[in-house]
Structure formats: structure tokens, C-alpha cells
Image (cartoon, rainbow, N blue to C red):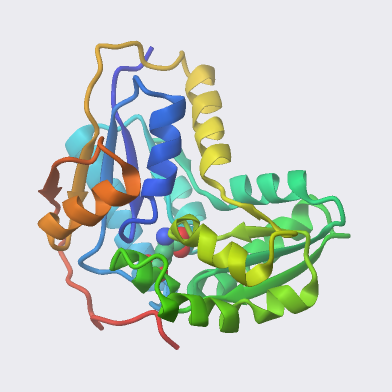
Amino acid sequence: MDDRPIGVFDSGFGGLTVARALIDLLPEEQLIYVGDTGRYPYGSKPQEDVRAYSHEITQWLIDTHDVKLVVVACNTASAAALADLQATYDTPIVGVIDAGVRSLLQVSTTNHVGVIGTVGTIGSGAYQSAVAEVDDRVRLTCAACPGFVEFVERGELHSDQVRVLAQRLLSPITDAKVDALLLGCTHYPFLARTIADAVGRDVVLVSSADETAFQVRSMLLDNGGTRVGPHRAPLFLSSGDVDEFARIGAMLLGPELDDVGRWSPTTQNPAGGSDNL
Ligand code: DGL
């Protein structure tokens, strides 16, 4: 049994959907979570910037906390950097894209599915390749949803503005008549009600969080087993405003997020950008 913690990172709050699934499935494992809110959103940034951020956080998790495994709890970072990270570090590294595709194809009965994500994720073609690799007969409709991440980061999950934006951005998905839709950005499960209202209740919404947690558990079991107590509280860190991260993060994740530390990246947000096109 390996007593060391598990590292998890995302551009901000999105990875909390994966952290929630990990805490529920593996309550004895300690998580060290980095939310790179100081440099979010990742979805509108060049892939090489997202790759550099992903390396910086992964290296820090390994060097500072000696993590036994890193979960890239961000689709944009998984698309831009997972293969590179896995080739660089000896520590096992898990992304969310393959887990999402597995979950999506499990629930579809028509083999006509959708994926929504950031501009970076959809533009990378990572989902198009991952789905075709599993089954090239699947009909896949993809849509980028710029702006969704910002609503989640503000804790604004049900406003009229986000509903109007969802209606507009999700119309290609509605028109395509998919039977299952993967929320291919870890922020999006927080908007599930708004997304479901826009695409209709006949479409099954799928998230990668649970399947990612199952994958982590099976990797730990293959490597000597999961941790056995005593309980160690998760550690949450943010490169942005830590008080804001604690306030909105607790609303999104639950009571486990009651304290947030500061994580300082070596580079600042270059564009201070927005995920809007
Ligand atoms: N949670 C990230 C993802 O899954 C959001 C990326 C962003 O910051 O734009 O892609």
C-alpha cells in the first residue's frame, strides 16, 4: 500500500467534479488539488501554453508532495499535454478524455453521440480521434462552448444569461439528435441542469468524473492497493484569489473544501484572457 497523496489539477473549479468522484470512491486517499484560477481559462489559450502550465503543476505536485499519481482533471490540458506528461514523468498520469469516451459509448444505444468542450479541446480533435479509435462507426457531433467556463468560475450556474448562451451554443447538438452527450469539460457538470434544459430530457448527459475515479482505483489496486486510514483531509490550492476559491469551491464541491492555500506559478496569465471567441 502506497501512503502518498494523489495530485489533481485543473484550470480552476472544473476538476472539483473529478475530485468529488475521487473522494466518494476512495475516501481514504488524500488529494492535493491545484486550481490554476490565476491563469484560467485554458480553453482559449494556445496548446503550448496549456502544455507548459500542465508540466509546471505536475512537476510541482511530484517535487513538493511526492504524489503517487497525477489526475489531469481538465479536458483542455488532457488534450494538449497528457501524452507529453506521460512521456516525461515516471509517476502514473491519468487524463479524462478516454474515461469520458468509455462512459459516453456505454450509454448510447443509437451510436449517435455528442461531445461539448472548450475551443481548445474541440479544436484539438482529441475526442474525434479517441471516439474513432474505439469504434469508427460512431457518428459524433462536437460543439465548442466558449463562455461556459466563465459562468462556472463566477458561481453563476442558473442565470438567464447562461441559459440563453446554452440555447445558442447547443443548437448543433439539438439539431443532430444525439442520444448521449459527453460534458467534455470538467466545469460543465456544474451546468448540467441548464444544459439538460437546452438539449432536452431525451439526451443522456455523461461526465467523465466517475469513470476517471474508477480508472484511478484500478491503477492503485494494480500497484499494491488503495490507502488505508487514518483519514487525511484534502488540500486545496489556487493560483488566484484563495478566499473566492474557498467560497465558490465549497458551494460546488461540498464541505470538504473549507480551506484554500496559495499556489504560486512561475508565469502569470499572459493574456488575462477570456474563453469567448
Ligand atoms: N475544466 C477545463 C476543461 O475540462 C476547463 C478549461 C478552461 O479553463 O477553459 O477543459
The residue under the point 20% across, 66% down is: 38
State which quarter of the image contains the N terminus. top left
Q: Residue at x 26, y 59 (%)?
A: 36
Q: In the picture shown, does residue 156 fall above or below 105? A: below
Above or below residue 12? Residue 117 is below
Nearer to the camera, 238 or 48? 238
111 relative position to 175: left or right: right
Across and down, in percent, residue 74 comes to 44, 56
Q: Residue 231 location in percent, x, y?
A: 25, 17
Residue 227 percent across, percent down from the top left: 36, 16
Picture quadrant where residue 99 is located: top right
The answer to whether residue 34 shows anywhere in this view is no
Tell me where residue 86 appears, x and y as whole percent: 47, 46
Q: Nearer the viewer, residue 170 or 22?
A: 170
Relative horizontal placement of residue 222, taking residue 81 as reference (left or right)? right
Q: Where does ligand 1 appear, by image quarter?
A: bottom left
| Residue at 23% over, 41% down | 257
Tally the numbered discs.
Answer: 0
Q: Residue at x 49, y 71 (%)?
A: 118
Q: Quadrant of residue 123?
A: bottom right
Farthest residue, direction bottom: 277
Residue 232, quarter of picture? top left
Q: Is residue 37 visible?
A: yes
Q: Quadrant of the C terminus?
A: bottom left
